[in-house]
Amino acid sequence: MRGLLGRDDAGGDDAGDADTGGDDARGDNAGRYRSRDHRAGGKEQRRARPWIERIGLAGIALVFASLFGALALGSWSGGELFLAIMGGIGCFMTLWVGAITLAKG
């Protein structure tokens, strides 16, 4: 995407490219367009969330997944096939995100 916008790390012609020393759109040289290697250079690694927060977020995901599942079942029984499929996809995606939240934090 950056290559399409002219903001690639290989020296794009954008005036906001931090590698060329120009100012970005906000007026400061914050390095918004630097590569991931530059951003992760001197910073500490990201810490995992505490278990209580993971369980809480997974619980919220479970509530939303049950709502999507109820929508899918109600739509299926009412004959709305497209809405049922979309509700089912929303249910599975929300369950997936909840499981990832528990696993990775």
Image (tube, grey):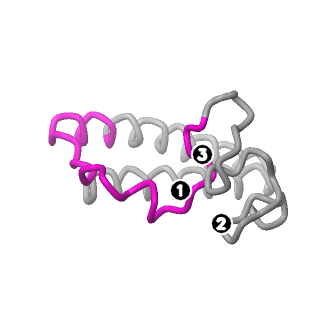
**Residue for point 70% across, 49% down:** 77
Alpha carbon of mark 1 to alpha carbon of mark 2: how far? 33 Å
Q: Amino acid at mark 3?
A: Arg
**Residue for point 44% across, 58% down:** 96
How far from the left and from the top, in percent, is residue 95?
43, 53
Name the dominant secondary structure of the magenta segment.
loop
Tell whether 62 sits left or right of 75. left
Give neighbour class at mark 3: few <14, some 14-19, many 20+ (Cα, 10 Å). Answer: some
Q: Earlier in the sequence, mark 3 or mark 1?
A: 3
Q: Amino acid at mark 1?
A: Met
How far from the left and from the top, in percent, is residue 2?
74, 61
Q: Which residues are magenta?
A: 29-58
Q: Nearer the viewer, mark 3 or mark 1?
A: 3
Q: Is residue 97 magenta?
A: no
**Residue 76 in view of the camera:** no
Given contact means CB atoms under 8 Å apart, are the residues at marks 2 and 3 in contact? no
Q: Nearer the viewer, residue 51 or 44?
A: 44
**Residue for point 55% across, 38% down:** 30
- Mark sitting on residue 9: 2
Q: Amino acid at mark 2?
A: Asp
